[in-house]
């Protein structure tokens, strides 16, 4: 077998593969013998079908299969041995002037199109400055989260008068154009969570008592058609088209009362004796908020680096080849027009992948199996620790980690996470970071 490469330009090449009988005949003969052993044809004992008959029945299809296998293996080997950075996989190139005669030819020539990865330089330098923003965890934010936690662990109590944030149970009755109850109209006993009601309608609820009545326009109750459908007991499509008014009669008022900030709450959240005062409780909340917002800070910084490097590094892709390749390999049939419409998003993702791979290669970033196992164990410990601290011993933790990593998709995801952590560490050492602490609202408004 002879493979030659012809570069069309920096991003596209043609591979010419010449296959001779000596390349594929031994494999074909072996496959024919296997077919002979398995063949079951009336008039012949199993395994005793004449070779000539097997060749006549299966010879051409077996030859085609073996040549295709040979081509696939040889192309992969050629690319690997010659260290060619390809995008996608080689695509068979149609030659309108050539027809393969599988019955009479014994030598064949195949052409493959190949997309080449662009070559580019990338320098990570301290000259590049990035703002590293963190959330200022002040007393106001800590108190807010303390109140939220107390509500989360609180209990539902009955109330006499509706306030914002209450759950209200009552009856919806559809009205006619004169404001009278519509005969045969919609009637539904339902629950309303005021926080999910539009502000104008929410104001109508506030201050009401049991058996009080109000009139609501259907489309002013909530912006969410699914919620409206559930409240009124109708299909979503019906809810979307409703223009009626409804009378709502209050039947009961429920309010989530916050739990007391005491030892019982501390023990319920963290386990007995871990937190022993309100001061320790707020210190714990501050630590948890810092850890939670750290992920947001990391993500914001990482996204800024990605945007900057994408602007800084300018290279092209073999776009025409990649579009044809996507059409060829897609599980669901797609057209070139469909691919073209979404290609900009795909090309941005591919460009970043190429940049990331170069960063890994240039900086010799490696991830060991031991590191992946430890990271997996850490993920499992955090997940189960939320439900029950110290639920697993070391041996069980190791076994669980190995089971998780036995799933190829999960293993790939975890390897990418560890690589991501190492790349993040590299960014922090290579770039100049300007630390900035901002208020919670300012941070998340900027992130939006």
Image (spheres, helix red, strand yellow):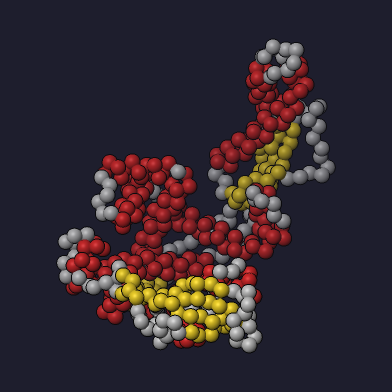
* Residue 22 rendering spot, x and y as whole percentages: 68, 24
Q: Nearer the viewer, residue 343 or 49?
A: 49
* Residue 186 rendering spot, x and y as whole percentages: 59, 74
Determine whether, in the image, residue 89 is placed left or right of residue 54.
Answer: left
Give above or below for 235 relative to 35: below
Give above or below for 150 relative to 72: below
Is residue 432 visible from the viewing direction of this image? no
Which quadrant of the rendered structure holds the N terminus?
top right
* Residue 318 figure quarter: bottom right
Determine whether, in the image, residue 427 is placed left or right of residue 142.
Answer: right
Q: Residue at x 42, y 69 (%)?
A: 300
Residue furthest front in the image: 183
Determine whether, in the image, residue 174 is placed left or right of residue 161.
Answer: right
Q: Residue at x 19, y 65 (%)?
A: 275
Q: Residue at x 74, y 16 (%)?
A: 42
Residue furthest right in the image: 97
Determine whether, in the image, residue 388 is placed left or right of residue 79.
Answer: left
């Amino acid at each position: 077998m002879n493979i030659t490469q012809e570069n069309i330009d920096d991003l596209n090449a043609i591979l010419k593969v010449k296959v001779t009988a000596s390349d594929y005949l031994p494999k074909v003969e072996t496959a024919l013998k296997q077919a002979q052993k398995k063949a079951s044809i009336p008039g012949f004992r199993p395994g005793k079908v004449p070779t000539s008959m097997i060749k006549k029945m299966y010879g051409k299809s077996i030859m085609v299969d073996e040549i295709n296998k040979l081509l696939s293996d040889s192309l992969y080997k050629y690319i690997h041995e010659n260290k060619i950075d390809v995008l996608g996989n080689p695509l068979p190139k149609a030659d309108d002037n050539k027809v393969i005669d599988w019955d009479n030819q014994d030598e064949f020539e195949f052409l493959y199109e190949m997309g080449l990865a662009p070559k580019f330089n990338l320098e990570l330098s301290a000259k590049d400055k990035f703002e590293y923003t963190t959330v200022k965890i002040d007393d106001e934010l800590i108190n807010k989260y303390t109140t939220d936690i107390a509500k989360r662990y609180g209990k539902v109590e009955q109330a006499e008068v509706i306030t914002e944030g209450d759950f209200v149970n009552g009856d919806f009755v559809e009205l006619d154009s004169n404001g009278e109850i519509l005969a045969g109209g919609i009637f539904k006993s339902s629950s309303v969570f005021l926080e999910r009601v539009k502000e104008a309608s929410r104001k109508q609820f506030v201050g009401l008592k049991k058996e009080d009545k109000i009139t609501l326009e259907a489309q002013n109750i909530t912006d969410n058609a699914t919620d409206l459908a559930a409240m009124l007991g109708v299909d979503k499509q019906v809810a979307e088209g409703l223009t009626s008014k409804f009378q709502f009669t209050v039947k009961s008022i429920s309010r989530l009362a916050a739990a007391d900030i005491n030892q019982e709450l501390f023990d319920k959240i963290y386990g007995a004796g871990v937190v022993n005062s309100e001061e320790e409780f707020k210190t714990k909340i501050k630590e948890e908020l810092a850890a939670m917002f750290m992920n947001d800070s990391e993500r914001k910084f990482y996204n800024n680096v990605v945007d900057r490097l994408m602007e800084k590094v300018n290279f092209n892709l073999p776009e025409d080849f990649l579009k044809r390749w996507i059409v060829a390999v897609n599980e669901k049939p797609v057209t070139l027009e469909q691919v073209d419409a979404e290609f900009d998003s795909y090309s941005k993702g591919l460009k970043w992948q190429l940049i990331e791979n170069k960063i890994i290669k240039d900086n010799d970033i490696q991830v060991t199996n031991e590191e992946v196992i430890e990271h997996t164990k850490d993920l499992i410990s955090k997940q189960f620790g939320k439900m029950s601290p110290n639920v697993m011993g070391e041996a069980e933790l190791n076994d669980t980690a190995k089971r998780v990593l036995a799933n190829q998709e999960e293993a790939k995801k975890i390897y990418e996470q560890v690589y991501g952590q190492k790349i993040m560490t590299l960014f922090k050492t290579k770039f100049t970071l300007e630390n900035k602490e901002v208020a919670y609202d300012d941070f998340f408004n900027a992130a939006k």
